[in-house]
Structure formats: structure tokens, C-alpha cells
Amino acid sequence: HKMFADGEFKTVIECFGRLNKKLSQDPEILTLVGVTNYRLGLHDDAEKHLRDALEIKPSSFSTLNALGAVQHAKGDFDAALATYNECL
């Protein structure tokens, strides 16, 4: 968490990549990888990981919120609004 807070996103991605191989069914790890990719501007990768997390835990507020942010950043405002509405 400290590396994430310090903005060391590339290092975080490398660590999560190794962790994700072992914990690929952990929605929290997938969400953190997605959020980290979003912060790096890797929106397609972020969306993939967030969607993978939602397949496992569909009602995760934090994952839905992050997915909405990614969709908004990609300019897909209708999808972002629909995703944010799922949070409610």
C-alpha cells in the first residue's frame, strides 16, 4: 500500500503481476491492479481487470466506482453513468 500511496505505480504493477498469478481469483487484487493501471493511463488494461473482478464479486462498490472512472476517462460517458448508477 505504501508504494501505491507514494505513486510508484510501475513497481506496484510488477508486484501485482507476480501476486496475480497466484491469486487470480481474488477480486480485491484484480481491483487494485485495475486501479493501478488506471492511474498509469492504461485504461484498456484497467477495464479488463476491473471487469474480471466484477465477474467474481458483481456488487463491489469500489470496483464499480473504479470502472466508472475508467469509462469516463475513455470518453464513454453513457457507460460510466450506467456503471455509477449500479453503485447506488
Image (cartoon, helix red, strand yellow):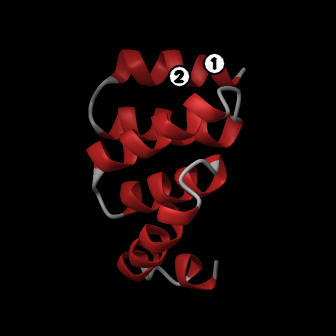
Badge 2 is on which residue? 83
Badge 1 is on which residue? 86
Q: Position of residue 39 (x, y in %)?
A: 40, 61
33 or 76: nearer the viewer:
33
Left/right of residue 52 with respect to residue 1 in the rendered view: left
Q: Which residue appears at 38% of the width and 48% of the height?
A: 46
State whether residue 81 appears in this view.
Answer: yes
Q: Position of residue 29 (x, y in %)?
A: 59, 58
How packed mark 2 is, by other alpha carbons closer than 10 Å (few <14, some 14-19, many 20 or more), is: many
How packed mark 1 is, by other alpha carbons closer than 10 Å (few <14, some 14-19, many 20 or more), is: some
Disc 1 residue type? Glu
Identify the mark at residue 46; answer none if there is no mark. none
Q: Is residue 80 above or below residue 4?
A: above
Farthest residue to the front: give it.
Answer: 22
Quarter in which the N terminus is drawn: bottom right
Q: Is residue 83 above or below residue 30?
A: above
Q: Is residue 46 above or below residue 40?
A: above
Q: Position of residue 40 (x, y in %)?
A: 33, 64
Quarter in which the C terminus is drawn: top right
Instruction: Give the alpha-carbon distance from disc 1 to disc 2, as whole Å.
Output: 5 Å
83 or 24: nearer the viewer:
24
Left/right of residue 61 with respect to residue 55 in the rendered view: right
State whether residue 64 appears in this view.
Answer: no
Q: Which residue appears at 54% of the width and 84% of the height?
A: 3
Cβ atoms at labels 1 and 2 below 8 Å apart? yes
Left/right of residue 37 with respect to residue 83 in the rendered view: left
Q: Quadrant of residue 65?
A: top right
Disc 2 residue type? Thr
Asked which secondary structure carries label 2, the reply is helix
Q: Which residue appears at 42% of the width and 68% of the height?
A: 17
